[in-house]
Image: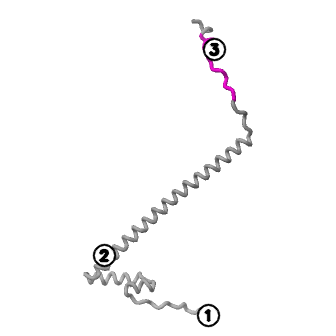
Amino acid sequence: MSWGLAKKMVVDRAPPAKRRRFPRRSVEELLEDARQNEARALVRFEQKNATVQKYENLKRRRERKLDTRRKIIAGAIALEHMNHDPAFAAAFGALLNRFVTKGPERVLFGLKVHAPTKPAPSH
């Protein structure tokens, strides 16, 4: 087979040029499509962000509940241990007296409520 004949066979079998089914769009139409795509993407982002926030808040609430539960259990153990160990009771009582400062909280532990201090008059 000659080169010319092989070339003709390939050229004859080449697919016809593709015709456009739709007319070309203007720059304004392309920009409008881009704006609409951006708006849709922003809505999807906000929805996903809201979902992430919801689950993060749920996780924080669970962690707070667990932390509160740990504190309650540890406090109950410490208060019960005060009944059995006088040295621990004295040390823990001193810590309570030192760090519990609010009146209603001091009453809970049977501590003296300090009178509020008045600021010194400035002349």
The C terminus sits in image quarter: bottom right
Q: What is the distance, in whole Å, between disc 1 and disc 2 at their CAs? A: 52 Å
- Secondary-structure class at tag 3: helix
Magenta run includes residue 100: no
Amino acid carrying label 2: it is Ile
Look at the picture and state if 14 lies above or below 28.
Answer: above
Q: Which mark is residue 77?
A: 2
Q: Nearer the viewer, residue 120 or 85?
A: 85
Q: Against 28, is 65 above or below?
A: below
**Kind of residue at badge 1:** His
Give coordinates of residue 53: x percent, y percent.
Answer: 52, 59
Would residue 2 appear left or right of 84 to someone viewing this image?
A: right
Reading the image, the residue beneath label 3 is 12
- The single residue placed furthest to the left in the displayed view is 84
Instruction: Name which quarter of the figure residue 65 lies in.
Output: bottom left
Quadrant of the rendering where the N terminus is positioned: top right
Please report whichever mark, 1 or 2, sits nearer to the chain's N-terminal start. Answer: 2
Q: Quadrant of residue 80?
A: bottom left
Which residue is pictured at 61% across the width and 8% down the height?
5
Cα–Cα gap, marks 3 and 1? 109 Å
Q: How is the image coloured?
A: one colour
Which is more foreground, mark 3 or mark 1? 3
Element type at mark 2: helix
Report if the CB atoms under discs 1 and 2 are less than 8 Å apart.
Answer: no
Classify mark 3: residues with Cα within 10 Å, few (<14), some (14-19) or many (20+): few
Res. 123 mark: 1
Q: Which residues are magenta?
A: 6-20
Compared across the picture, whether 7 is left or right of 103 comes to: right
